[in-house]
Image (cartoon, rainbow, N blue to C red):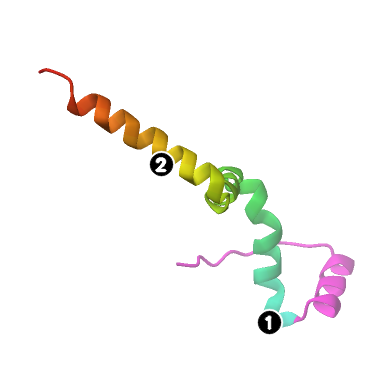
Amino acid sequence: MHKKMTISLDEAVYDGLYRTIGKRRMSQFIEDLLRPHVLDTALDAGYLAMAADAEREVDASEWANSLAKDVADETR
């Protein structure tokens, strides 16, 4: 869901933004600039990079499965 917001910019900045980006794309441009500064996406990028590493995923899966076997043998 998007929220509407009014901001004030220096006229020269607005004119440059309008000229460079275009009227209909300004909001998305500003959002794309702000997103990494206001949302914690660093962890997301790290998790995506780890998931893309097939060898690491195999090692992690083996480790997790070995822990499950240890728990299965525990007495309650």
The residue shown at (61%, 44%) is 42
Residue that label 1 marks: 24
Q: Secondary structure at mark 2?
A: helix
Q: Is residue 13 left or right of residue 63?
A: right
| Residue 66 position (above or below residue 51) | above
x and y percentages locating residue 17 in the rendered image: 82, 72
Q: Is residue 69 left or right of residue 16?
A: left
State which region is magenta: 1-22
x and y percentages locating residue 50 in the rendered image: 56, 46
Foreground pick, 47 / 64: 64
> Which numbered tag is attached to residue 61?
2
In reply to whether residue 9 is colored magenta, the answer given is yes
Foreground pick, 6 / 24: 24
Q: Earlier in the sequence, mark 2 or mark 1?
A: 1
Foreground pick, 11 / 69: 69
How many marks the image carries: the answer is 2
